[in-house]
Amino acid sequence: MAGKKKSRPVVTGLVVLALVATSGYLTVELRKLEEPGVTEVRNVGVLNGTRSSGGTSEDKGAESWARLENPARSVLRGANGQIKGVFTDGARTATLTGPARTFEEPASTASEVSTTDWVRFMPEPWSKGAEKEKWFKDWYAEYKDSKDDDIFAIAFQYVAGAPQKKDEQGIAYSGDANFGPLNTSGAENGDLRLEQSDFYDYLGIQYSFRDGVTGTPEAMRARSLDCSGYVRMVLGYRARYPLMSSDDSGDGLPRTANGMARSKQGVDVLPLTGVSAKDRPSAIDQLQPGDLVFFKLDARTGQRLDHVGMVLGYDTQGHLIFISSREEVNGPTIGDVGGVSRLDGNGYYAKTLRSAKRL
């Protein structure tokens, strides 16, 4: 992944056509038309300001806290019983209730997700009773009514058509991202686009990790983010969650989907039991916005999980939607190309879901 800069290869029209044809054939064979199936969501635990979480509030005259299990978490409710925040033991992810927003991608899907959930990182992992600690009081006072970009707003700054933004040094830190460069090897059954584009490849800058390793961008991967590189860009480089330089070096969020799924970071809300079809989680009740979801898509990767996305919420048709960077759309998407972005039912991604984690 890290190494000397490489120039972008020249691709002939015939090679590109052959690659597209091969990729199209594989997509058709591997991802048959979505099966209607039976929706497997039962009392889904995605929380927003209008849904019941199953907890109770004894004091209707003021804010109150309740404890829920599976996973263990604290829920803050307002005077009218409305959920104002959800905080999970062992995780830094907080889901706060704010103004409604709608996320959509009309070029790739008819799905729209309207949500009052705003997802942010706390400075420390949550624990029972943390609402009494100064660090939390200070953090909550700053963000409870904040309209600053949260994790969802950041995530959509890389979808198709997203405008480019630059920092004070002139580095373009957001804008329409590719998945990766075209694979010009011509190998049979080869992928259309290459993986291994991390956030520093997108940025085109060297990045020094906390373990002393320096990531060096490759020129051909400029403006590109593979599935895990996209998660690292949104949650790490932008939202400042610690990042590892690889799956094995440093502390924080590992480099690959498999490394993230198997790491000790955060809380396993859908524990990984295996990678075969029988290891698909039987229910997704515990998922909530901001959770990372992990998939087994490709038999060629053996026991490794090979795709990661982030739960966004319900679309207007009642389906639980996630966002991830994919080669078929060539970048981050909630779209339907190569399989709809649903976690419920028996579609391609729903059937290949294997685990989920709350950082």
Image (cartoon, rainbow, N blue to C red):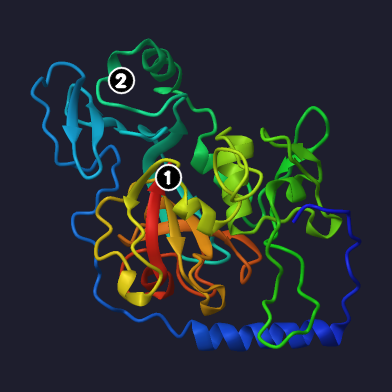
Three-letter residue code for mark 1: Gly
Q: Residues within 10 Å of mark 2 (few under 14, many from 20)?
A: some
Write the residue at 38% across / 74% down: 276
Q: State the residue lying farthest toward the left.
A: 58
| 206 relative to 334, above or below | above
Write the residue at 47% across / 24% down: 123
Horizontally, residue 353 falls left or right of residue 163, namely left
Element type at mark 2 = helix
**Residue 291 x, y percent position in the rendering:** 41, 48
| 357 relative to 91, above or below | below
Three-letter residue code for mark 2: Ala
Instruction: Identify the disc placed on residue 178.
Output: none
| Residue linked to disc 1 | 290
- The answer for how far apart the CA atoms under marks 1 and 2 are is 21 Å
| Residue linked to disc 2 | 130
**Residue 189 x, y percent position in the rendering:** 66, 85
